[in-house]
């Protein structure tokens, strides 16, 4: 979302248009399909998105909620019918809330997925090991470099065996497993030309598969 990516917090969102100006841009968009008019309506209603998203404090990523809400706003502006004598803000609020509620339901379903910080076993010295320890190896750790490389090779084989191509790409990019630097979800999203939230969902699914695979293969850490 080009608008939300440039704004740091809800105080940065522009104030709404005057009723007269809003009607002017609605008319331009509805009558001639003027996309610049539509984009203006989106930009000046982002404060409404931020206000609604702020109510859902139990969601871990407010930026994602604002993106989801902005999608609802775009749908609202596109489908808005001014002849029905409903205010745009009233109609848009329902669309924004619906999109956010769907995201919330999806989040609750995903909560059963594996966390990269969950303990998956013990090392040879009896210390707890987390999945993050396997995927993102610190060469300055207590393990020797050779041991680290052997461990990474084992993980790579499991990744190829149990994950599909897109899952492999995301895990490799996210944890620098192909000699590249560790990337953020947004950087991976830009490379694969998909949304950051989609990268997050695929990553969580892939990590769940990896946890099961590591246990199934009885990987010796």
Image (tube, rainbow, N blue to C red):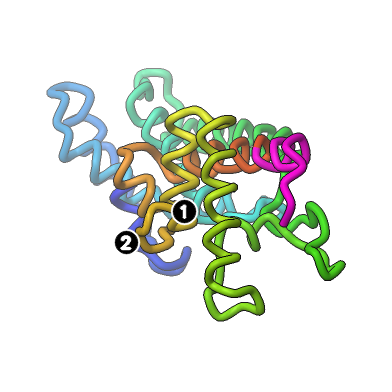
Closer to us: 29 or 129 = 129
Mark 2, Cα crowd under 10 Å, few <14 / some 14-19 / many 20+, is few
Give the magenta range. Answer: 210-221
Q: Residue at x 30, y 38 (%)?
A: 193
In space, the residues marked 2 and 1 are separated at their CA atoms by 24 Å
Q: In the picture, which quadrant includes the C terminus? A: bottom right
Q: Which mark is residue 174?
A: 1
Relative to 206, is 10 on the left or the right? left
x and y, in percent, of residue 8 in the image:
41, 67
Relative to 112, is 151 on the left or the right? left
x and y, in percent, of residue 138 in the image:
55, 72
Relative to 84, is 60 on the left or the right? right
Q: Which mark is residue 6?
A: 2
Mark 1, Cα crowd under 10 Å, few <14 / some 14-19 / many 20+, is many
Q: Is residue 63 magenta?
A: no
Closer to us: 77 or 182 = 182
Q: Quadrant of residue 214?
A: top right
Q: Residue at x 38, y 61 (%)?
A: 13
x and y, in percent, of residue 115 in the image:
70, 51
Closer to us: 120 or 28 = 120
């Amino acid at each position: 979302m080009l608008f939300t990516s440039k704004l740091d917090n809800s105080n940065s969102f522009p104030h709404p248009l005057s009723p007269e100006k809003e009607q002017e841009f609605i008319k331009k968009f509805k009558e001639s399909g003027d996309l610049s008019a539509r984009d203006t309506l989106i930009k000046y209603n982002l404060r409404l998105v931020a206000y609604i998203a702020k109510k859902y404090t139990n969601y871990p990523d407010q930026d994602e909620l604002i993106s989801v809400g902005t999608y609802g706003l775009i749908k609202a502006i596109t489908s808005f019918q001014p002849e029905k004598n409903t205010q745009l803000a009233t109609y848009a609020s329902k669309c924004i809330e619906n999109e956010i509620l769907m995201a919330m339901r999806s989040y609750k379903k995903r909560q059963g997925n594996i966390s990269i910080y969950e303990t998956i076993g013990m090392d040879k010295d009896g210390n707890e090991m987390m999945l993050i320890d396997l995927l993102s190896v610190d060469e300055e750790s207590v393990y020797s470099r050779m041991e680290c490389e052997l461990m990474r090779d084992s993980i790579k084989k499991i990744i190829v065996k149990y994950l599909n191509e897109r899952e492999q790409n995301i895990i490799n990019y996210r944890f620098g497993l192909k000699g590249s630097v560790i990337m953020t979800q947004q950087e991976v999203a830009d490379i694969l030309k998909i949304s950051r939230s989609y990268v997050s969902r695929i990553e969580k699914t892939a990590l769940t598969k990896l946890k099961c695979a590591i246990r199934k293969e009885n990987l010796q850490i």
